[in-house]
């Protein structure tokens, strides 16, 4: 982990309130894993003194990409950055997804901007491990659907759900997950025949539902939690999550990725 001045190569609007920023940074390109994040200084002024945590969307040979949604003053300022400017950031941070636990069938469940870190994960599972990957993308409306074509270009099976039914299945991504699991033979969930692994990132309500679905069936699942992480290194104690074994862990330092069976939800 280092504090860096990364060069912005591009920063483009790619959807309804969504932006994609490409950064040239060899150090991050070499050591960042899918599921890790960076802490970004959005401006030099006091108005956004605290850094914003952003998940790494893609990792390419000479840098990284971030996909972010404008939700407040910090991300609004970030959206105004131009190519050629330097971005003050700290990273990579967090643990990332454990891809050594990938199975024959891997199911990625994304809600809203939670789709961002799952793209890097899909690239890892497909390009490096040649695993079978199903992706469930949940969005509010058709204009909020992101990364569908990227997942398809990787060879993933992609299903879409929208809250208003304007594209794909009308309902939640968790319902798509239930429908897909219904096509898998229950015995494939058993440890000695385990062929299914679930990864998820998105709103807390969605992650709780994914946890309940997978625990009921005995399917291993990793979730990436989204929290307000002011420091990113476990110092400010602002992002605790309660563990089943007792006590708390920090989402920024000990996560953001956790095995769901370890969480006291």
Image: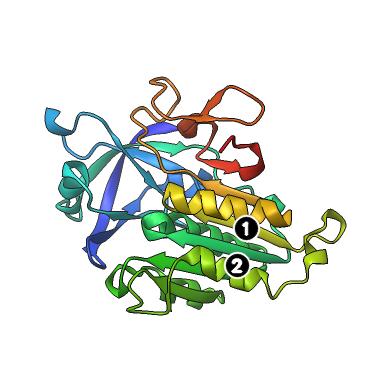
Choose between 239 and 33: the one closer to the eye: 239
Label 2 vs 1, first from the N-terminus: 2
Q: Which residue is mark 2?
A: 178
Residue 62 place in picture, x, y as percent:
42, 54
Is 264 displayed left or right of 204 in the figure?
A: right
Q: Can I make out residue 149 in this image?
A: yes
Q: Which mark is residue 198?
A: 1
Choose between 208 and 126: the one closer to the eye: 208
Q: Residue furthest right?
A: 192
Q: Which mark is residue 145?
A: none
Residue 207 place in picture, x, y as percent:
51, 50
Residue 164 place in picture, x, y as percent:
32, 73
Q: Is residue 17 above or below residue 34?
A: below
Q: Measure the C-alpha gap from mark 2 to mark 1.
A: 12 Å
Q: Can I make out residue 34 in this image?
A: no
Label 1 crowd bin: few (<14), some (14–19), many (20+), radius 10 Å:
many
Eye-nearest disc, 2 or 1? 2
The residue located at (64%, 31%) in the rendering is 244
Label 1: state its secondary structure. strand
The residue located at (45%, 50%) in the rendering is 205
Is 74 displayed left or right of 111 in the figure?
A: left
The residue located at (27%, 72%) in the rendering is 143
């Amino acid at each position: 982990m280092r504090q860096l001045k990364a060069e912005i190569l591009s920063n483009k609007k790619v959807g309804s309130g969504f932006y994609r920023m490409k950064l040239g940074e060899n150090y991050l390109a070499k050591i960042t894993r899918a599921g890790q994040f960076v802490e970004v200084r959005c401006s030099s002024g006091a108005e956004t003194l605290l850094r914003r945590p952003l998940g790494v969307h893609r990792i390419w040979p000479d840098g990284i990409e971030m996909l972010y949604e404008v939700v407040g003053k910090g991300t609004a300022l970030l959206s105004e950055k131009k190519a050629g400017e330097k971005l003050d950031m700290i990273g990579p941070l967090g643990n990332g997804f454990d891809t050594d636990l990938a199975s024959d069938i891997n199911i990625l469940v994304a809600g809203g901007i939670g789709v961002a870190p799952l793209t890097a994960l899909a690239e890892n599972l497909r390009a490096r491990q040649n695993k079978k990957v199903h992706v469930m993308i949940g969005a509010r409306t058709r204009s909020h659907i992101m990364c569908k074509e990227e997942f398809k270009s990787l060879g993933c099976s992609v299903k879409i759900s929208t809250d208003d039914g304007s594209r794909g299945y009308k309902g939640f991504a968790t319902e798509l997950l239930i429908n897909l699991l219904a096509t898998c033979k229950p015995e494939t969930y058993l440890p000695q025949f385990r062929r299914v692994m679930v990864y998820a990132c998105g709103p807390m309500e969605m992650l709780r539902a994914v946890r309940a679905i997978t625990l009921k069936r005995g399917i291993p699942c990793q979730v990436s939690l989204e929290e307000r992480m002011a420091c990113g290194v476990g110092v400010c104690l602002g992002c605790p999550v309660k563990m089943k074994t007792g006590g708390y862990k920090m989402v920024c330092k000990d996560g953001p990725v956790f095995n769901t069976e370890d969480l006291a939800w």
